[in-house]
Image (cartoon, helix red, strand yellow):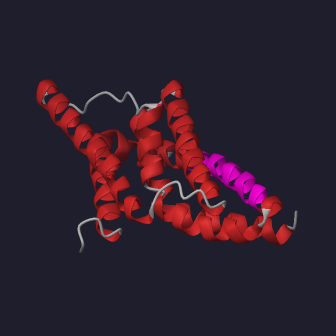
Amino acid sequence: MELRVLGQAAGMFAATNIDDMLVLAVFFGHAGHERAAAARVAAGQYLGFAGILAASVAGALGAGLLPGSAIPYLGLLPLLLGLRAARRAWNSRRDAGDEAPAASGAGVLQVAAVTFANGGDNIGVYVPVFAVAGTASMVGYVLVFLAGVAVWCAISWFLAGRPLVARALSRWGHILLPVVLIGIGATILIEGGAFGL
């Protein structure tokens, strides 16, 4: 496998996943200092990204797993999860007075759903690249991308653990998580043309 392919794969991963770093930092911040909750975030990120890779490989091999017109509607997943998180934050805050709700972290499937739904643009970029890359290069891309997920998780965990960031996420994370999820969902729906805009 050529070094050029590995470099291209690393660059493509970084360019198509920069938004995931913020989302992961929010998820890790929401997890607090619980290692089990942080492990669920990382597992969910891997599961969701594995779905993106599977759809991309299938699309490159001609299986056409998702029609292009369906991809914008993936935005409904984070939108609904964001609305659910907002409702929980509202109910917890109302029940607890002015105290922020305790962090329990997101579940594996919640993180995976957000990652996959946010990956519609990734699939759109990866499919044509994989289609012309050949089998050996496609395997190289996949391996670099999977290593990239680990790097992204580590950076996001680090950012969420910085005192200033941690204090902000601890104080505002229960509000920031629904806002980010709703924003991601709305962006996917609008930019994907789900409403003909």
Vertical relation: 96 (above or below) 27: above
Q: Is residue 183 magenta?
A: no
The vertical placement of 128 against 32, above or below, is below
Which quarter shows the C terminus? bottom left
- Residue 28 locus on image (x, y percent): 47, 40
Q: Is residue 140 or residue 182 the one in the foreground?
A: 140
Residue 172 visible (yes or no): no
Estimate the x, y position of residue 53 in percent, counting from the top left: 61, 52
Specify whether 98 is left or right of 51: left
Give the farthest residue toward the right.
Answer: 1
**What's the residue at 60%, 45% (across, down)?**
50
Q: 157 and 52: which one is in front?
A: 52
**Magenta-highlighted residues:** 138-155
Closer to the camera in the image, 136 or 115: 136
Residue visible at 31% across and 27% down?
102
Q: Position of residue 46 (x, y in %)?
A: 58, 42
**Residue placed furthest toward the front:** 63
Tell me the quarter of the picture where residue 14 sits: bottom right
x 62%, y 49%: residue: 149
